[in-house]
Image: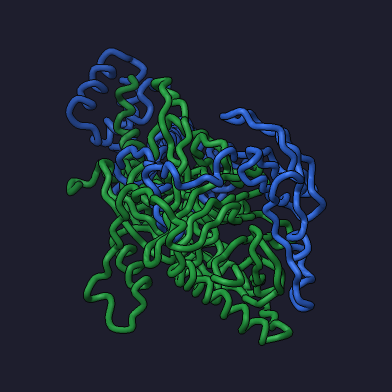
Amino acid sequence: MLWLYWRRWRPVIAVTSAVLGALAALLVVADNLAGSGTGAAEPPAATRGPAGPQPQIVVPSDNAQVRRGLLLMSAAASACQKVSYRGVQIVAWSGPRGSTSYLIDVWHRPGRPELAESEKDVVPSAISGSATDRIGAAVGVLTITPAMLALLRSNYIVEYAGTGSSSDRRAQIVAVRRRDGTLAAQYWLDLHTGLPLRREMYDESGRRVSEGAFIDLEIGAGQIGSIPSAEGQAWEAVPVAASSGGRGFPPIAARITQLRSDGWPVPSALAGNMTLASVTRTGTKSGQVLDASYSDGLSVVSVFIQRGQLSGTLPGWDLSRIDGLPVYATQSDDVDEQGLAWSAGGFVYTVIADAPQDSVDQIIVELPHERPAGFWQRVLRGFKRMGSWLDPFR
Amino acid sequence: MSHLGLWLSALVDGELDGIERDRVLNHVAGCDMCRKEANAMRALKRRLTALGETCAETKIVGRLIELAQVEQEPGARPDARAAWGPGDAFGPLARRRARLNRTGVKVLSGSAGTALIAIAVIAFLLGSGSDGPPVPKVTPSVDSYLLQHLRDAGQEPAGTRAVQGSPGRAGYQRYKAGPASPGGQFGLNLAHRAGVSGRLMSPLGTGSPGPTVSLSASPEPIASATASQGRVASATANPTASGSSQPGASTGSRTARHSAK
C-alpha cells in the first residue's frame, strides 16, 4: 500500500529538489567568490604599509663629526674602487642559533669588483651517498659600493668616532648609528688609503653580532700577484620597459611595477630598512629565477624567486622552523651560509643573507608563506573546485 | 473503519484516476466494510447534493465558525472533533494527514541536512592543497644562488684558487660554535700556524672574552704556538669624546689571546 502515498510525497520530493538546486546555485556563487582571490599566501610585504612609526631622529651633537664621517665613508667607497690590494678577511657572525666564522681571499684591481674566493664544502648526498661540492657564500663584508653608501646615508647616521688601528695599520673610526642613536656598526678605515680594514656590527641591545677584518693585507698593484679568474656569469639585469620609464623616473620603481604586472611578487622593501637595490634574472631548466637584492647599507639580502613548488624530496636540505613557519635550510653547518627556502602562492622563495640572524628571521617571516587553511576556507576552496566542474567553459 | 481512509473519500468524490482508481476499486470490490462505507458516503453525498443551494441560517454559520476557532486552539481538538458527532470519521483522516505532514517535514529536513553535510564533507576533502593551478616542482639551485649573492654584495666569485695568492690564509680553518650563551659571550678562537702570522680575532660579545672552544683538527700538523709569540690582529680604538660611549668602541681594544695546539 505504500505506493499509494507517492502522491503525498511529491511535495517532499519537490522541496528536496529545490534544496539541491539551491546548493548548485551556492556552488556557482562560491566559485565566483573564491575566484575573487582567497589565496592562502600572505600578501607581499610590498603591499603592506610601514611596519611602524619611524623612530625619532637623534641629531648628533656635533655636525662636524657627521660631515667628517660622511667624507671618510665616501673616501672609503672610492678607495674600494680605485686601490689595488690583496688580502685575507675573516668574517664572523653570531646569533641565537649559533656563531660561525669564515675566511676569504680577496683580490682587487681598480675598476673591477672585488674578487672573492668561494670555498667549497664537501656535503654528502642523502640519496646517492656520494659527496658533492657545495660552494660556500664567502662574502666579504668590508667592501663599500656607492649604492651601499647611499643606502647607509639614508638609513643611518654616519659620524667620525676617533682613531685606532687594525691589522697593524693606523685607522680612523667611523660610527654608524641608528636613528634612535644606538650604535649599529663601526668601520676602521685605513688612514693612508681609506680602505675599510675592519667592521663590527651591533644589534639594538649593543651586542656585537658581526665582525669582519683583514688579517692579511697587501696594498699596491705590485703586491697582488696572480689573480684567479672569475667564476660563472653574472645574471641579466631586468630591463625596464620603454613605456614605464621616462627621464628621471626611478628605474627600480619601474622594474618593480613591471615585475608585479608580470606576476612576480617582488617586495619593494623588507624588514629592517632593507631596500630593493637591484633585480636580476636568469633562466634555468626549471624556469626563470629572479634575484631581488636588498640592502640597508650594512647587510645584503638576496631573495631568489622562482615559479613552482618545492620538491617533496630535497636531498641536502633540512626542515626547520622560523617563528613557527616551516622553512627548508641547506645542510650547512655554517649558519651564515645557509640558504633558506620555502614555497608559497605558486612561488619558491630562497633567501641568502649576510645579515644578523634576527634580521634574517624578521625578513623571512615578513615574506609570503603558506598558512594552514581554516575549515571554512578549505570548504570554500572545495566548493570552488566543484563549481569549476559545473562550468562548461573550463 | 475503512481500510482506505482518504482514498475512499477521494474515490467517492471522483478525484482518482487511472491506476489509483482501479486499485481502490479492486479493494472495494473485495472488502465488504469498505464497500459499505463507500456506499454510505455516496448516499450521503447524494443527499447533500439533493439539498441544493440552501441559505444557511445565521446560527448555523456562527456555530461552524465557532467550531473552527475552537479547533485551532491546542488541547481543544478532541472536543471540537467530538462536536462533529457521528461525523467522527473525519477525525482519523485528519490525524493521518497531520502525521503524514510531520513525517514529510522530518524526511525533508533529514534529507536536506544529510545532503548539506555530505556536500560540505566532499568540499572539505576537495579543498586540500593550494588554490592555484598545478605548478612544477622546483629544487633551488643554491650553488648558483650563492655566487649571485656574492655579486649582489658588490663582489665577484673567484673560480680557481690562486696558488701563490693567499699566504696569510694557510693554517686558518673554519670555526663553528653552538648557540650563544645567555650573556652573549663566546670566544672566537681561530688557529694559525706558527710562523705565518699569529693573528687572532677579538671575541664577539659585549662582555669580557667568553669561554674559548678547543680547536678542531687542522688539516696539517700545527706547531704549538701562543698568541703572544706571534703578531696579533687587533683593533684598537681611541675614540673621541663624542663617539666613545658605545660599547663597540670599548670592546674594540680587546684582543683574545689563546693557545693553539
Percent from the top left, x then y, of residue A272? 58, 63
Q: Nearer the viewer, residue B80 or A80?
A: A80
For the point 34% across and 54% down, the residue is A290
For the point 51% across and 48% down, the residue is A104
Instruction: Please state if A299 lies on the left or on the right of A256 as rendered.
Output: right
Percent from the top left, x then y, of residue A258? 30, 67
Q: Identify the image quadrant of residue B190.
A: top right
Percent from the top left, x then y, of residue A71? 57, 80
Q: Identify the image quadrant of residue A221.
A: bottom left
Instruction: Please state if B93 lies on the left or on the right of A159 as rendered.
Output: left
Percent from the top left, x then y, of residue A90? 59, 50
Q: Nearer the viewer, residue A153 or B202?
A: B202
Chain A shade in the render: green
Give me the chain that's blue.
B
**Is residue B42 visible to us here?**
no
- Taking B105 as reference, is A242 above or below it? below
Screen quadrant of the N terminus of chain A: top left
> How many discs appear?
0
For the point 64% across and 54% down, the residue is A210
Q: Nearer the viewer, residue B195 or A367?
A: B195
Instruction: Please state if B232 lies on the left or on the right of A146 as rendered.
Output: right
- Taking A122 as reference, is A56 above or below it? below
Q: Identify the image quadrant of residue A174.
A: bottom right
